[in-house]
Image: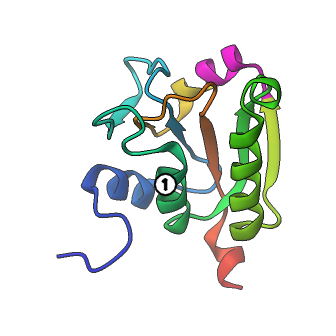
Amino acid sequence: MKRNGILNSSISSVLSSMGHTNSICIGDCGLPIPDETKRIDLALRFNIPSFLETLDAVTDDMAVESYILAEEMKDHNPEMLENIRGMMKKKFPDAVECFTSHENLKDQTKTCKAVIRTGEITAFANIILVSACIFAAQG
């Protein structure tokens, strides 16, 4: 039995299989997930689990070199954006923050190893995490 870290076997398996530049998405409960992309559905009720607690747990178990957010978050969910920035700066000070349209972000989920669906119900609470090279992190 695993002692710490991600206990969800699907998330743990995806993170273990990721290489440098592979990506994983964490999304709110309304994000459409392409049929060809692995769906890891954690949503139980509205806001359970929340986007931020899921992001915190996942980023404790992976190295991130960049992350992609919807441009629309700046205007429609600035509080969430600031929470994400604070968490990412603390954990990955050199990670590059990127923005794209919400439509493009949805399209990019097709190339993610998986999309983790949370119970989050705030607008544009979606992120694509791009995996860093762990050799550099071990350095």
Q: Residue at x 58, y 47 (%)?
A: 22
The type of residue carrying mark 1 is: Glu
Q: Position of residue 75 (x, y in %)?
A: 82, 25
Residue 64 falls in image quadrant? bottom right
Q: Is residue 99 left or right of residue 18?
A: right
Q: Is residue 17 left or right of residue 41?
A: right
Q: Position of residue 119 (x, y in %)?
A: 40, 35
> Which residue is under mark 1?
53
Q: Is 126 drawn above or below residue 54 in the view shown?
A: above
Q: Residue furthest left?
A: 1
Q: What kind of secondary structure does the magenta stretch mostly adopt?
A: helix
Q: Is residue 47 magenta?
A: no
Decide: few, some or many residues near mark 1? Use Cα within 10 Å; few <14, some 14-19, many ≥20: few
Q: Residue at x 73, y 66 (%)?
A: 92
What stretch of residues is rendered in magenta?
A: 100-107
**56 or 120: nearer the eye?**
120
